[in-house]
Image (cartoon, rainbow, N blue to C red):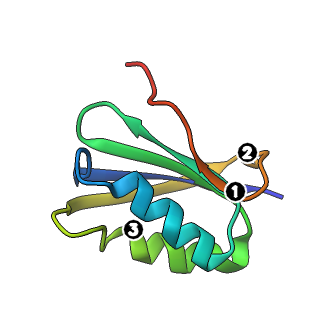
Amino acid sequence: MSAVRIVISGRVQGIGYRDWLVHRAHRAGVRGWVRNLGETQVEAVVGQADAVERLVSTCWEGPRGARVTAVTRAVADDPGVTGFCRRPSARQ
């Protein structure tokens, strides 16, 4: 099964965006992971195509204090995990 790579840009760090997304992903029942990417982006890889669209739409909301300016998506490899988790930040 393929997955979707989502990159969320804007004010999405230092406000609990990753924890918020983990919570939303658990509620949506999707597998995958999320991590910080650079200084103004969060990256997520999400599986289970039936629930992905709802989660992608939700990424525009974010937690209180978030100001999302872009949500991009691309086909990705299967996330290879059960459940949904945080990963360490990507090194740039």
Q: Is residue 73 above or below residue 51?
A: above
Name the mark on residue 77.
Answer: 2
Residue 80 point in image, percent of width and height: 79, 45
- Rendered image: mark on residue 3: 1
Of residues 38 and 29, the one nearer the viewer is 29
Q: Which residue is mark 3?
A: 59
Q: Which residue sits furthest right? A: 1
Q: Residue at x 36, y 60 (%)?
A: 71
Mark 2 or 3: the one toward you: 3
Tag 1–tag 3 contact (CB < 8 Å):
no
Numbered mark located on residue 72 in the image: none
At label 2, the amino acid type is: Asp
Please rate how many residues cluster around mark 1, counting C-alpha atoms within 10 Å: few if below 14, some from 14 to 19, many from 20: many
Q: Amino acid at mark 1?
A: Ala
Q: CA distance from mark 1 to mark 3?
A: 16 Å
Q: In the picture, residue 69 is in which quadrant?
A: bottom left
Name the element at disc 2: loop
Q: Report if the CB atoms under discs 1 and 2 are less than 8 Å apart.
A: yes
The quadrant where residue 66 appears: bottom left
